[in-house]
């Protein structure tokens, strides 16, 4: 088994985005940019307490940051963390592509040959 160098971080990221609401929040933040917690709560028809719990999970995984200006809390995506997961999926895909290329080569050469 190949060890991924950021395995602990990747585990936190994947756990955080295992929830539909958190994936939706992260998507919204990546598309729209920084948003106020109150606006996010309104958009998702959730209480501030519920949305804050989801945001805290995303914060713990390092997927978002919070900036407080006065009494307003702004949430911003951290794309470098998103890229860690993206890179892992890319590596996984390339492993399978290599295997499929090898299988294709074997099939084109008439199968496995015993010497």
Image (cartoon, rainbow, N blue to C red):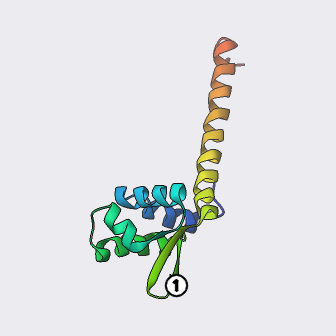
Q: Is residue 91 above or below residue 111?
A: below
Give whichever of 6, 36 is nearer the camera: 36
Identity of the residue drawn at 36% across and 55% down: 20
Identity of the residue drawn at 31% across and 75% down: 48
Identity of the residue drawn at 61% across and 40% down: 93
User: Could you tell whether 100 is left or right of 16 in the image?
Assistant: right
Give whichever of 40, 51 is nearer the camera: 40
Residue 47, image x, y percentages: 27, 72
Residue 70 visible in this rendered orientation of the protein = yes
Which residue in the structure is indicated by mark 1?
69
Residue 76, image x, y percentages: 54, 69
User: Could you tell whether 78 is left or right of 114 in the image?
Assistant: left
**What is the residue that sits farthest to the right in this orientation?**
115
Secondary structure category for the residue under label 1: strand
Residue 46, image x, y percentages: 27, 67
Q: Is residue 96 above or below residue 49?
A: above
Work out which quarter of the rendered image holds the C terminus and state it: top right
Q: Is residue 63 above or below residue 1?
A: below
Residue 1 visible in this rendered orientation of the protein = no
User: Could you tell whether 39 is left or right of 103 in the image?
Assistant: left
- Kindly indicate the quadrant of the structure image that contains residue 109: top right
Identity of the residue drawn at 64% across and 33% down: 97
Residue 8, image x, y percentages: 56, 68
């Amino acid at each position: 088994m190949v060890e991924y160098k950021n395995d602990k971080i990747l585990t936190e990221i994947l756990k955080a985005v295992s929830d539909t609401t958190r994936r939706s929040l992260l998507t919204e933040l990546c598309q729209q940019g920084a948003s106020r917690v109150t606006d996010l709560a309104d958009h998702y028809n959730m209480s501030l307490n519920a949305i804050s719990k989801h945001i805290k999970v995303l914060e713990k995984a390092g997927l978002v940051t919070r900036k407080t200006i006065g009494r307003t809390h702004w949430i911003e995506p951290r794309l470098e963390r998103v890229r860690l997961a993206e890179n892992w999926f890319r590596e996984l895909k390339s492993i399978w592509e290599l295997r499929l290329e090898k299988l294709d080569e074997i099939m084109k050469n008439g199968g496995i040959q015993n010497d």
